Image (cartoon, rainbow, N blue to C red):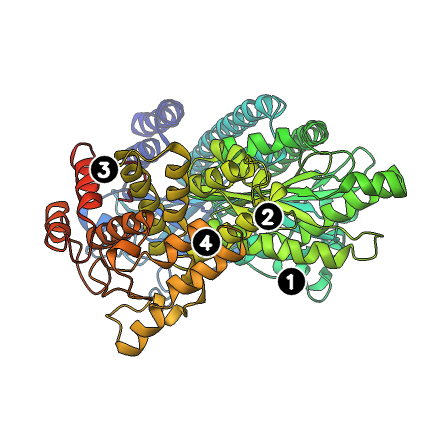
Amino acid sequence: MEGVEAGAVRQLQALLRIGQVARGASREDALAAIAAILGESLGFATVAVNLYRPAWDDLPVVAVHGSAAARAAIEHTATPRSSWEGLLDDRHLNRGAYDLRHGEHEWGLDDVATYVPPAGAGTGPDPWHPDDALFVTMTDSRGALLGVLSVDEPVSGCRPTDTELDILVAAAAYVGAAVEQVQASEANGRLRAATRTLLEVSSTLNSGRSTQEVLSEVCQGIRRALGFEIVATYLLDRDGFFRARSSVGHTTGTGPLEAAYPRAAIEALTAPELQKEGCVLLDGPTVERLAPEGTPRTYRSTMNGEGPRAWRNHWLMVPLTNEAGTLTGIIGADDPSDRLLPTRARLQALRLFADQAMSALEAAGRLERMRELAERDPLTALANRRALEAFLAGSDADEMALLVCDLDHFKRINDQLGHDAGDETLVAFARLLERLVRTSDLAVRLGGEEFALVLPGADAATGLALAQELLRATRESFSRLPHGLTVSVGIAAGTQPTNLLREADRALSVAKRSGRDRAVVHHAETIDALLAELTVPGGSGDQLGAVLLLAETLDLRDDATARHSRTVGGYAELTGRRLELDPQRVERLRIAGVLHDVGKVGISDAILRKPSQLDAAEWSEMRRHPELGARILANAGLADVAAWVLAHHERLDGGGYPSGLPGSEIPLEARVLAVVDAYEAMTAGRPYRSALTAEQAAAELARCTGTQFDPDVVAAFLATVGEQAPPAFVAA
């Protein structure tokens, strides 16, 4: 009797120890300790704890008390729940335990990992057989399965008595309660952490953020707080489709971010009767049944599990409605990190956060509308000057082109047709600008009849091409006005956005003052030359403007020609000063240097851009450019410049072209152009030869002095370039 009482006391003490262990250790350590306590107190050499895993609908062995052979056979194995059903059959039930006797189950025919002790059957009146098995389920307070205790190898060698079975069942219930408590504590901890994270994110949503910033914070917050690997927000566009506006987890440019979901499809999938806690959770077959034909199926979950509580290609959506109750967006979440369907508490947290997000979105929308009013022209709805300045200041484009446009003689429309007609014309021109530009460009009304276009990533050639198209489209679109309508355009391009507006304004001034209905690209040399010409009473501004436009066109055809012309103009100016020519003559000489190759507009691209040396026929064609250039300049009223350009390839010995003039008949300015043109050509590389050094080029000039070049000009030029660093106009 004393032995029985001592055993009962030992077993009761074991239950107390189980409670203490469950409260004081991590789940893994606690279950290992509990297995050991059960084995030692109840007298079983082998005890295994199988814990139910809802995400996979299986029971992995998480703790084993027993021999090395037992641990090697079953530790860390997992058995599908369905495989346990035959073992946990009521026909095996004995006082709350599942008691399988030898011969009642054929081991090895199912997915259950087993360990058969090496010893033979026990002794006594009711001996334990190695193929016997004893299982006790652990359930939570609602009766749901938490796990299974498996015991084997009773130390007594006998099958357990009724009293021992009762104690084993009680111990399993006690362990189940402890496991439920730990799981509930972990779940509550996760929920508290999630709520704390969501509250932290919510507190930042209404701090003057933009709609895009709010959406991004919402996605990040749900991912961090609720453990979804993929979160995306979709907003309803004006065309009736929901499109992704922000996401985490998806790769940019992939299907889910590119798809457009019809309004009818989203309304069908988020109908009120489908909502639970303000969210919609649908399995794949239900989506297929409810979604209208054509609804995109752009993503399949990768964090799927198995079983009734597992995530399996589900759709989780949270409808977003405005103050009027209209559906304006959804939050979609996918790939839960625990592979489980969200609990009611998680859905409630998600809905609460979505409500906070919707409030922040409405506030952000109001703020953006206020900002838009501040940065939009009220008449044309284009961006205004304030928006332009912000755009330029915030641009990270490597290069940018800016066009400033001014409607020619616009006052005439207001005076003759009235201001309403003038406003209609301005609005129509704004729409024309929007049709011509890319989505990445910015169309601006600067004020009055002045507009601007910003082209990120564009160069001067692209800007000029668009300007020419704008000139044509303006003439055609407004041809029904009594006097028609034209536009002048100034173009600037470069890497410093803050300078472009001023430069484009100067180019526009040139376009307006040199005849209107034209586009002028800003080059410091050509702009200055034209403005200087326009300040001379009776100057030929219109004609010179046309010539400079031709020169710019040539520059844009051949970048090497552009650099060459600017450099020759600068060298010519320096040399003229060295020769003590009067300032006006020096300026005319500089203009001649800039324009000396304007005749090449008549030479084919195949010759201009040929990567190898020209043949005899091609050289014959190329030698026509002085005559072509002279005719262009003469027609522009620039007779003096025309004469110099015509003769800039003549030689002192009479062996030059096109006229074979001797030295005495070659104008001084043409002799200057000949020297500086040759020097620049020698020191600039070509596809078919390398550039000479400054010393080599100077030696070549000296060698040809008296036969090809004027000695005085060569001396003046070499003295100029020899006494200073390369001028700023010399291209690197």
Residue type highlighted by circle 4: Ala
The CA span between labels 2 and 4 is 14 Å
- Mark 2 — residue? 542
Q: Real-space Cα distance between discs 4 and 3?
A: 24 Å
Residue 444 % position (x, y)? 65, 39
Earlier in the chain: of badge 2 and badge 4, it is 2
Residue visible at 62% across and 23% down in the picture: 208
Q: Nearer the viewer, mark 3 or mark 2?
A: 2
Whether the residues at callouts 3 and 1 have beta carbons within 8 Å, the answer is: no
Task: State the quadrant of the N terminus.
Answer: top left
- Report the residue that reaches farthest toward the bottom: 617
Q: Are marks 1 and 2 in contact (CB under 8 Å)?
A: no
Identify the amino acid type marked 3: Pro
Which of the two labelled residues, at mark 4 and mark 1, occupies the earlier sequence position?
A: 1
Say what amino acid the circle numbered 1 marks. Answer: Pro
Report the residue marked by disc 1: 285
Q: Is residue 110 visible?
A: no
Quarter placement of the C terminus: top left
The residue to which callout 4 is attached is 551
Alpha-carbon distance for marks 3 and 2?
34 Å
* Left or right position of 18 against 413: left
- Calculate the distance from the C-alpha at mark 4 to the C-alpha at mark 1: 69 Å
Q: Is residue 439 above or below residue 4?
A: below
